[in-house]
Amino acid sequence: MPEPESTTCAISGGGPAGVMLALLLARAGVEVTVLEKHGDFLRDFRGDTVHPSTLELLDELGLADELERIPHRDLTTVRMDTLDGTLVDADLRRFAPRRKYRHIAMIPQWDFLTLLVEHARRYPAFRLLMNAETLGPIEHGGAVRGLRYRDADGEHDLRAVLTVAADGRRSDLRRAAGMIPIDFGAPMDVLWLRVSRRPGDVGGGLTARIGKGEMAGAIDRGDYWQIAFLIPKGSYRRIREQGLDELRTRLARLLPFLGDRVNEIDDWDKVAFLEVGVNRLRRWDRPGLLAIGDAAHTMSPIGGVGINLAIQDAVATANLLAGPLLRAQADPARFDRTLNPRLVRRVQRRRALPTIGTQLVQLTAQRRLIDRILDGEEPRLPAFLNGERAGCVLSQLFARIMLYGILPEHVRTPDRSGAAAPAPADRAR
């Protein structure tokens, strides 16, 4: 019988958290294998909001210039209107005038992931398996010793010192390992659509409009508008039954500048449904297993922080565990030993405050703003969104939390490959 495959760190999920962690570990000399169940990264309406916290990390890795060459749009303004007037009119550049990056880069996630993967492939310790579906953990002696996966050639065992669940909010590995998150609920789901953008359209940011019992936002993506239409939780079937004509009418009422372009939404295949949830695991780890990103904590779309928190988790994981993994890699008996659980648990301790704090802000906004809007009541801005009096300080704090994060991470892992890495960009934003 052939020997099972092996690696030092097996990562289930080729999203931002999994690929960033793999890049940093491989860069530090740790053998790492990423398993992605799809054959490519081309899935629309995924998180495309690359915040300043992530831009700073890419700069530290010398990837800022390469990212700038990817066609994208920089979001610098956020405006929220009601039928009676303006609630929020913010310029992101004024919240942190001394920071290098003061915008959100709207980059298609497949381009972002391709950038990270191409850089990771410079390191011989990196391995990516596409069309590889995780089936569950390999367990022995009370610990996870790797994972089992399926590809075109059948089922395989992949032994590992550490196995990481980075496979998103519906993590197959998390579920198979019996790790159940606490659900905090959400009052809304979201329909994602796209409508063409015309040269005369106002641009440069996000424009949201609140109507009677409804809300929509339009994000400038250069040659099109990415539309988020909020619907009450559990109402998707009813909205489909009402038909596309009703959906187009509501969008035209909320976003009148679109005019007849709402007619471009002529098939339900052009409407992507996002089931919104907010949850997190009590414990992110079991012996030999760690969950990060959406697999550890699903975020609300409020603030667009999901992928950025996931990437911060990945950087923290690499900073804390690259050294222990590199030492374990040299041990001939590594697959029969368990990486010290106290070391693995440090990741959750490091990332607990940013996760809980950000979710608290999101849950407050859901309760005080979104829930009231969808119930047809007068919206009440939480203090951290109110730009007047004491709320002004809180609104600046809110912006900093969403743009730069609580306890932002920085790359501490060394580059052990000996290859010349690109230098960080000197260009100021």
Image: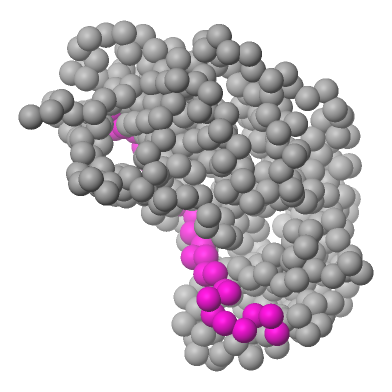
Residue 132, position as x, y percentages in the image: 33, 45
Asked whether 89 falls inside the magenta stretch, the response is no
Residue 307, position as x, y percentages in the image: 57, 45
Residue at the location (64% across, 17% down)?
Answer: 421
Q: Quadrant of the N terminus?
A: top left
Q: Quadrant of the C terminus?
A: top right
Residue at the location (18% across, 18% down)?
Answer: 336
Highlighted magenta segment, given as a residue range: 263-291
Residue 51 visible in this rendered orientation of the protein? yes
Residue lying farthest to the right in this orientation? 200
Q: Nearer the viewer, residue 330 or 399?
A: 330
Residue at the location (62% across, 78% down)?
Answer: 375
Residue 89, position as x, y percentages in the image: 87, 58
Horizontal arrangement in the rendering, residue 50 relative to residue 260 (left or right): left
Residue 203, position as x, y percentages in the image: 86, 61
Determine which quarter of the picture holds residue 348. top left
Residue at the location (26% across, 25% down)?
Answer: 6
